[in-house]
Amino acid sequence: MKDPAQGKKPRYVEIADELRARIEAGEFSETGKLPSERVLTEQYEAARNTIRDALQLLRVDDLIESRGGSGVYLRTFRRVQRDAVGRASRDVWGAGRAIWSKDLQDRTRSEDVKVSPAEPPEHVARTLGLQGEAAWCRDKLYRVEGRIVMHSVAWYPADLVEGTAITERNTGPGGSYARLDEIGHGPARFSEEIEVRLPLSAESKLLGITMSTPIILIIRTAYDSEGRPVEVNEMKLDSDSYRLIYNFNS
């Protein structure tokens, strides 16, 4: 005889199903905000960890998202589809387009840009082959539809980019890669290292995410046709805002 307990859903799954039904019924549509964890523990007479596990199932389904210091809301933001290969192709920047326009199509976007000469971190200097030499830093905070989605810090050898628009806030059509191409060092290939981890306090504050929302760290290195590293770009992405796509030709 089959044990009646077999097949019974865990309590957090039951709560997730009930919350999903309430969302589909439009119960939270007016404010877009779900009750706090404390209120949900009372409503469902469940432990807080059980409520958190239930909410995590709804996050996986892209039904809700957490906002730093504010609470849990119905998800309205459409994830940015980051085409890692297509966005960095010559077809994009060679045509005078910003490479992240490939990700966004017609969605509204803005950037806060800081440019300065600076001493790069040791690992960046090592990758760029700099030994006590100067570098230029381009620090950018990216917004899509008013939402901060990424912080990037890109480094370039000073001897290579001095006197080019890469040292200015506005690099012109096609961005830094088009300017590198104009001086004979256009990117011919790339490598990307990816790490997923929880944010540091400063990263959480900068991106406007909770301390429990992972960030995606991508370190991209661009090489010219002679194999010289011409850029190291460290990008920190809000994992709630992105979906990464990698398409390769055989």
Image (spheres, rainbow, N blue to C red):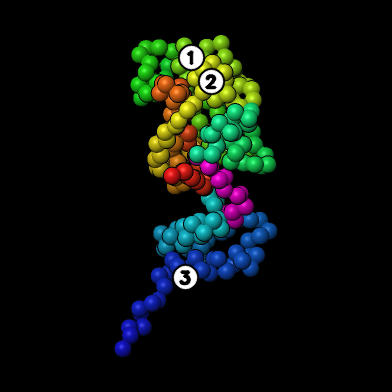
Which residue has dot 2 on it?
180
Residue 57 to residue 100: above or below: below
Q: Residue furthest front?
A: 250
| Secondary structure state at the residue bearing disc 3 | helix
Q: Nearer the viewer, mark 1 or mark 3?
A: 1
Q: Which residues are magenta?
A: 72-84
Residue 118 visible from this viewpoint: no
Mark 1 / mark 3, whichever is N-terminal = 3
Name the residue located 60 percent from the left edge and 64 percent from the top edge. Answer: 23
Residue at the spot x=43%, y=60% of the render?
A: 53
Q: Left or right: 149 with respect to 228?
A: right
> Badge 1 local density, few (<14 within 10 Å), some, or many (20+)?
some
Q: In the image, 77: left or right of 58?
A: right
Amino acid at pointer 2: Leu
Residue drawn at (40%, 43%) of the image: 196
Residue at point 64%, 33% (across, down): 110
Q: Which mark is residue 184?
A: none
Residue farthest toward the bottom in the current orientation of the protein: 1
Relative side of 155 to 105, left or right: left
- Residues at marks 3 and 2 touching, judged by CB atoms closer than 8 Å: no
Q: Position of residue 182 (x, y in %)?
A: 57, 18
Q: Mark 3 — residue?
A: 14
> Which picture quadrant has residue 50?
bottom left
Q: CA distance from mark 3 to mark 2?
A: 56 Å
| CB within 8 Å, label 1 to label 2 | yes
Residue situated in front as seen by the camera: 72 or 244: 244
How many numbered marks appear? 3
Spatial separation of the CA atoms under disc 1 and disc 3: 60 Å
Numbered disc 1: secondary structure? helix
